[in-house]
Image: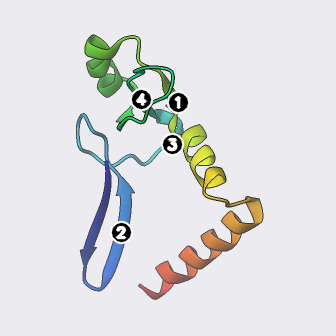
Amino acid sequence: MIEMTTGKGLSIVRLACDVCHEPITDVGMAMVRWRRETEDYTTDLVYCHKGKCDKTLNRQHEDDPWWELRHFLARLVFNCGMRCEDIIRAMDDVEELQKLG
């Protein structure tokens, strides 16, 4: 799930595992899963850590499709209209804001 935490004048957005509810901090060790319904559909996404959390889901949804989180995020920002230079500028902005915070 996507969470927003605020406190002491700061706002922090993060992804939390839908299985264990701990933060996802390594995009290479996390995945996004979804249920395949029909040819054309919209569905909810499940964010989870690879390994123990993923294995817990596999019992119920063994055949569900999934993407590694880093590939999902790349597709998401691309589909939102961001290109490499936009991402670099945004990351620089976030870094500057973190210094102020």
Q: Which callout, 4 or 1, points at the residue further toward the start of the chain?
A: 4
Spot occupied by residue 55 in the image (x, y as percentages of width and height): 32, 18
Residue identified by numbered label 2:
12
In whole angstroms, how far apart are the C-alphas of marks 2 and 4? 24 Å
Q: Which callout, 2 or 3, points at the residue further toward the start of the chain?
A: 2
- Label 2 CA crowd tier, 10 Å (few <14, some 14–19, many 20+): few
Left or right: residue 89 compared with residue 69: right
| Quarter of the C terminus within the rendering | bottom left
Viewer-nearest residue: 1 or 95: 1
In whole angstroms, how far apart are the C-alphas of marks 2 and 3? 17 Å
Residue identified by numbered label 1:
67
Q: Which callout, 4 or 3, points at the residue further toward the start of the chain?
A: 3
Q: Which callout, 3 or 1, points at the residue further toward the start of the chain?
A: 3
Q: Which residue is depicted at the point 31% across and 41% down?
A: 17
Colouring convention used in this rendered image of the protein: rainbow
Q: Are marks 4 and 3 in contact (CB under 8 Å)?
A: no
Spot occupied by residue 3 in the image (x, y as percentages of width and height): 30, 58
* Helix, strand or loop under label 2: strand
Viewer-nearest residue: 16 or 51: 16
**Which of the numbered marks, if any, corresponds to residue 33?**
4
What kind of residue is marked 4? Arg
Q: Which callout, 1 or 2, points at the residue further toward the start of the chain?
A: 2
- Label 1 CA crowd tier, 10 Å (few <14, some 14–19, many 20+): some
**Which of the numbered marks, if any, corresponds to residue 31?**
none
In whole angstroms, how far apart are the C-alphas of marks 1 and 2? 24 Å
- Label 4 CA crowd tier, 10 Å (few <14, some 14–19, many 20+): many
* Helix, strand or loop under label 1: strand
Q: Which residue is depicted at the point 42% across and 21% down?
A: 36
**Which of the numbered marks, if any, corresponds to residue 27?**
3
- Is residue 98 shown above or below 19? below
What kind of residue is marked 1? Trp
